[in-house]
Amino acid sequence: MTRHFLDLDKVPAKTLRAILEDARAVKDARSGRPKGTPDDDLALAGRMVALVFEKPSTRTRVSFDVGIRQMGGETMMLTGSEMQLGQGETVADTARVLSRYVDAIMIRTFEERTLLELAEHATVPVINGLTNRSHPCQIMADVMTYEEHRGSIAGRKVVWSGDGNNVCASFLHAAGRFGFDLTFTGPETLDPDPKVVDWARGEGARIVIERDALKAAEGADLVVTDTWLSMHDDASARDRRHNQLRPYQVNGALMAKAKPDALFMHCLPAHREEEATSEVMDGPHSVIFDEAENRLHAQKAILRWCLGA
Ligand code: CP
Ligand code: NVA
């Protein structure tokens, strides 16, 4: 069976744990080596991976490209507007054609159905590099980062402050898979998808919705936020969202409610002084650049699992 990496709720917990262990080994093996040198085992030698972007990206684009090259593979960067996909060719036909040329496909797109249709018709692994609904590679890197700094995330209190968006949905999936508690704090109109909340609860995760941000942050082990307006959101909603979300800004007062050794995460790109202050982003709790780095290592392990390499 083709091993797709579509969402954290679609991959068993044991597999996700094994991928993170491999990511750790992959990272350790490269410690101190120049970034441009290949890995010893060249796990992806002779493999070609298509990287398809229908939205902008810095981290996803660069970390996949560098990681694949370190593993001895080749990459092909494709933007939606350059492909027939955007001109009316069906996703299913695109999937069938790309499968004849490449060994795996990473896609960043808008609608989740595009990702699912691609996976349904591809005969090579498909990896979700973000959709309007989720961002699983990011949260694999985030769990890896938490555990590097503080040990097992199981049983910890994670607080998500802000928009209940795609990144939040993957954190909810991760709560179910890795066994941590998640408190969402944000305005009711921006609550996470109730189906995802129910799924996480069904997996035994304690999910709390708390409108008061300072109360929500009490005793947190990890505080997370993200942009107030995602790439798929209507830009005309900006002012309304800013007014709604201002009470959920992650600032010094909010972090003071968390545990003294709490971590702060943001997947980036950030709008400084909006969803989080620079005081927090550059402060002692912040691990935002470790998260960004770990995208590289986590995704190499995801690719190795997908390709059995
Ligand atoms: N965090 C993240 O996915 O960043 P990019 O949009 O830069 O890829
Ligand atoms: N929620 C953001 C994440 C960017 C990495 C977006 O979808 O734009």
Image (cartoon, rainbow, N blue to C red):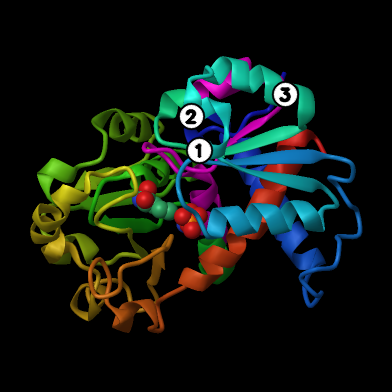
Amino acid at the residue labelled 3: Ser
Above or below, 43 against 251 in this view is above
Above or below, 7 against 17 in this view is above
Mark 2 vs 1, N-terminal side: 1
Res 227 quadrant in image: bottom left
Query: x and y percent of residue 50 in the render?
Result: 68, 39
Q: Which residue is mark 1?
A: 81
124 or 220: nearer the viewer: 124
Task: Give residue 86's mark.
Answer: 2
In the image, residue 260 lies in the stretch drawn in magenta: no
Amino acid at the residue labelled 2: Gly
User: What is the secondary structure assignment of the residue under circle 3?
Assistant: helix
The reply to whether residue 21 is visible in this rendering is no
Q: Which residue is mark 3?
A: 99
- The magenta stretch is 115-144
Res 36 quadrant in image: bottom right
Q: Tell me the distance, in whole angstroms, between the alpha carbons under discs 2 and 1.
A: 6 Å
